[in-house]
Amino acid sequence: MVRVEVSLDPGEMAIAACVGAGRQRQALAKGYENKHGFRGLGWSEHIEGAAGEMAVAKHFGMYWGGAYNSWKGADLGKNIQVRTRSEPWHELIVRDDDSDDDVFVLVTGRAPNFVLHGWILGRDAKAPSWHQSHGNRPPAYFISPDYLKPMDSLKP
């Protein structure tokens, strides 16, 4: 498996931090509840998630708009959803209500340094053998990086 390392520069980090904080601020203002059994404040998760999206955009040389209210929509292009996890051994998470037609990219790390592990289509991620629960949270599909397609095979 070929993994791609991406580091954000200070300017990119500042933008991602503003977007992540803005997303959390908007969620609080609209009274959104945490989802999928998450317990926490959400500030760092939104910032790290935004930075992961920027890392994928940087890898592909794509514009990243940093949308605030695209909770289930694409993070990049028309159908790319980025799932950022903090630890390198974490798996890609895809949920039952995620689009079968979207591409899901696993990114691990903490800003400013990330590893892009690969991607999978939503429909392919929803194999019964990957459906499980971790940490007393609702079940989801947890896909090992070993089953992801390499980043260079994704053509956004």
Image (cartoon, helix red, strand yellow):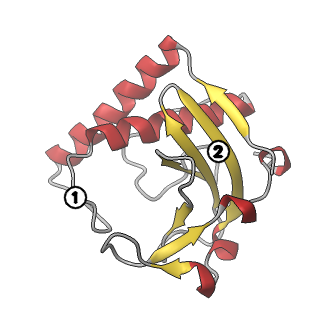
- Left or right, residue 37 beside residue 130: left
Q: Which residue is drawn at 40% across and 54% down?
A: 71
Specify the farthest residue to the right.
Answer: 153
Q: Residue at x 62, y 84 (%)?
A: 129
**Residue 62 makes an appearance in the image:** no
Residue 46's x, y, as percent? 35, 41
Note whether 127 is above or below 41 in the view shown: below
Residue 84's x, y, as percent? 50, 47
- Left or right, residue 62 beside residue 36: right
- Mark 1 lies on a secondary structure that is loop
Name the residue that disc number 2 marks: 77
Q: Residue at x 48, y 80 (%)?
A: 132
Of the residues shown, which amino acid type is indicated by label 2?
Answer: Gly
Q: Nearer the viewer, residue 20 or 30?
A: 20
Disc 1 and disc 2: Cα gap in Å?
A: 30 Å
Q: Residue at x 68, y 48 (%)?
A: 117
If the image is split into quadrants, where does the C terminus sit? top right
Q: Which image quarter: residue 115?
A: top right
Which disc is residue 105 wearing?
none
Residue 116's x, y, as percent? 66, 42
- Viewer-nearest of discs 1 and 2: 1
Q: CB atoms at circles 1 and 2 under 8 Å apart?
A: no
**Residue 131 makes an appearance in the image:** yes
Category of crowding for the residue at label 1, using alpha-carbon neighbours closer than 10 angstroms: few (below 14), some (14–19), many (at least 20): few
Name the residue that disc number 1 marks: 39
Which callout, 1 or 2, points at the residue further toward the start of the chain? 1
